[in-house]
Amino acid sequence: MEARGLGRTLPGEPPVPLVRGVDLEIMPGRFHAVIGPSGCGKSSLLYLLGLLDRPTAGTLTFDGVDTLPLDGDARAQLRLERFGFVFQFHFLLAEFTALENVALPIRRLGRLSGSAATQQAMSMLEAMGLADQAGKTPDRMSGGQRQRVAIARALANDPSLVLGDEPTGNLDSQNSARVVEIFQRLARDQGRAVVCVTHDPEVAAAADVRIHMLDGIIEKID
Ligand SMILES: Nc1ncnc2c1ncn2[C@@H]1O[C@H](COP(=O)(O)OP(=O)(O)O)[C@@H](O)[C@H]1O
Ligand SMILES: [Mg+2]
């Protein structure tokens, strides 16, 4: 994902700039952390990179494809095929089991038959150490388990880009460390591009690249 002069301003009197003049390359095999004070535009930037919001300035290309001309359906299809999202709150469907939750995006993509989709979902849960939780609904799992189901769901269609917005925000330090290890593995062992908004210094320290934001701009990258 490559951003050049990327900006997002909310219309109004006066207009409210959320993100300004962002030049950024998100690379495969790297774990990128986006850090900075509350309200500085981290989530706004992540929503632009994840094609959940549209920029009002600049360019944004994914795998060499200009994303700006894509309509809503094309953007949704690209997200479903290539992106995985993990948020602070797990957003699992309460009435579905872990396995069913993970199988949903696989079924939506429609490339695998019913039983193959279930098998794929099961292997995602296994990779998260949750094989024994597959038949449980979210209310019968711990917070850490629920968040790992959410990660399994994000990975269900084998995304090239994984985006997290404070994915450890509701977790204790042990579960947090587990999620960080998973994110490192997704980048370093599996070659995915990982972008994670965080205010947790331990998550930031574990990343390969730190993107420091302040007042909607990138202050530095280290
Ligand atoms: N839809 C919106 N309407 C009004 N203000 C918004 C909206 N989205 C974000 N903001 C404001 O823009 C700023 C950046 O928000 P955000 O990207 O969520 O910051 P962060 O994730 O770094 O805490 C904040 O001051 C926030 O209140
Ligand atoms: Mg935020």
Image (tube, helix red, strand yellow):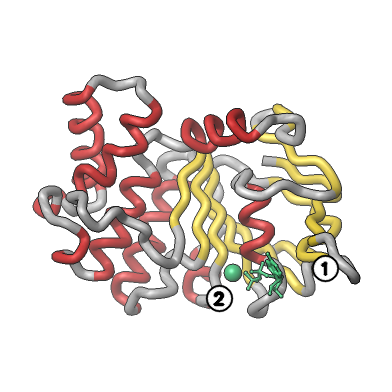
Q: Kindly indicate the quadrant of the structure image that contains residue 199.
A: bottom right
Kind of residue at disc 2: His
Question: Label 2 crowding class (10 Å Cα cut-off): few <14, some 14-19, many 20+?
Answer: some
Specify the quadrant of the image occupied by residue 14: bottom right
Residue 199 is marked as 2
User: Along the line of sight, which residue is nearer the eye, 143 or 211?
Assistant: 143
Q: Is mark 1 within 8 Å of ligand 1?
A: yes
Q: Is residue 186 above or below residue 33?
A: above
Figure quadrant, ligand 1:
bottom right
Seen in the image, is 146 located left or right of residue 82? Answer: left
Residue 21: image x %, image y %? 85, 56
Q: CA distance from mark 2 to mark 1?
A: 23 Å
Image-based side of 59 in relation to 127, left or right: right
Disc on the earlier residue, 2 or 1: 1
Name the secondary structure under disc 2: loop
Mark 2, ligand 1, within 8 Å: the answer is: no
Q: Which element carries disc 1, helix, strand or loop?
A: strand
Residue visible at 58% across and 62% down? 33
Could you tell me which quadrant the C terminus lies in?
bottom right
For badge 1, the amino acid type reads Val
Q: Which residue is mark 1?
A: 16
Question: Residue 218 has which mark?
Answer: none
Q: Is residue 18 above or below residue 57?
A: below
Residue located farthest toward the right when viewing the structure as drawn: 14
Q: Quadrant of the N terminus?
A: top right
Could you tell me if residue 160 is visible in this image?
no
Q: Residue at x 72, y 62 (%)?
A: 221
